Amino acid sequence: MAYIRPEKRKYGTAYVVWWEAPPDAKHKVRKRNKTFRRRKDAKAFMGEIEASLAKGTYVDMTAGEARIGDLFDQWITGKRGTVTDGYINDLTASWRTHVEPVFAYWKVNELRYSDVQSFISGMAEIRSATITNRCLDVLRGICDMAVMDGRIAKNPCEKIKKPRRTTRKEERRYLTIAQLYRLADASGRWRPLVLTLGLTGLRCGEARALQVKDVDFKKHRLRVYKATRRVNREWVTKDTKTHARRDVPMPACVEDVLRPLCEDRAPNDLVFVRDDGKPFDEQTASRKVKNVEGKYWWWCALTTSGTPIMTMHELRHTAASIAISAGANVLLVQRMLGHENPAMTLKTYADLFDEDMNQVRDVIDANVHDALTTFTTHGE
């Protein structure tokens, strides 16, 4: 309950509004006050305080003065264990590079919608949509935590207009089967890896974590449930990107190249490893990287085979293209690639399903023709 206490001051009578803030983890009862020169203003403020206390929307002004930089450390610590270490690194990098220089010393209760929108709009002009949206995710996450902690009443990052990720049809490269095999042949000892990525759609991290026991030659399946990626120069194996397990169909041509890699091997041995037994290195399509001791072989394979310059990750697109041309529907491709839902698959590969639309048109035309023929015959 709030109340007003008049007090004598040098300039005259002051009106002090006193109220009890909701308890927090450190204090059972928190006394708060604010001083006004006029009783009218004190009464108006007291009404606002009592209303917010009754509705449960009260925000402690002192708590809202926390710096955004300090809140980031608390927020990113809370993310650990709920998302992958790689994503933690991506969020931290976005904070250090883009968000911290601008907002680290801002008080969280000073942040406004217009401030965030201006920042995001400026970022979108010079950075990719992915980086810009990740910066927004950082700010939104910090403010969400501040709302839950009672530091601010509303998240200023809500309804921010963010840039859309543009995926142009001509930018996505699909290799033909002949091109894929030429690339695999030019990859030397990594030929089985290239064929596996290009025909099953595994992510590089998933292939890196694939063990002998995960290759089921009897059921013709690859069991995918882990992924390995480099975090702070160390290889870390965690759940897959979507934290889901899936079985991926393994064509006979993939079985043929994987069988020699799995024979006489322990179940927990990695399928794709370097000569020293470590996971295969991350590859780049940049000509600036030299093929030192066979570590960076991807660029050499691309140029030798005459394949368009592309990343290893793009072999997933080739796998999707081959599967769809073989008659796989959206649900099967979704399960194969490990997408969260069919909508993501359809959005990503909508251009590959154009032929299905033509087939639907042909079927409709055939059905209409048969129906009209029957109607005409019976009518006569």
Image (spheres, rainbow, N blue to C red):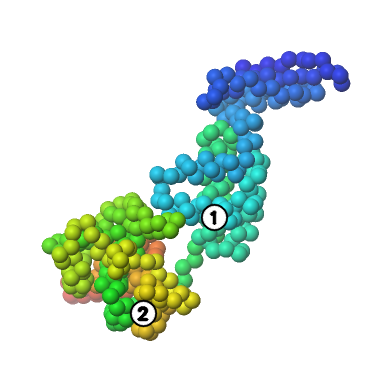
| Near-viewer residue (266 or 216) | 266
Q: Residue at x 62, y 35 (%)?
A: 64
Tell me, yes or no, if residue 195 can be seen here: no
Q: Name, please, the residue furthest toward the left.
A: 218
Instruction: Kindly identify the amino acid type of the residue bearing the numbered disc 2.
Output: Ala
For residue 310, above or below residue 24: below
Based on the displayed image, in which of its 4 quarters is residue 266 positioned? bottom left
**Which numbered mark, 2 or 1, is in the foreground of this view?**
2
Res 301 label: 2
Q: Secondary structure at mark 2?
A: helix
Residue at numbered disc 1: 94
CA gap between label 2 and label 1 equals 33 Å
Q: Position of residue 148 (x, y in %)?
A: 52, 35
Mark 2: give few (<14), some (14-19) or many (20+) Cα within 10 Å.
Answer: many
| Near-viewer residue (354 or 338) | 338
- Quarter holding the C terminus is bottom left
Based on the displayed image, in which of its 4 quarters is residue 31 positioned? top right
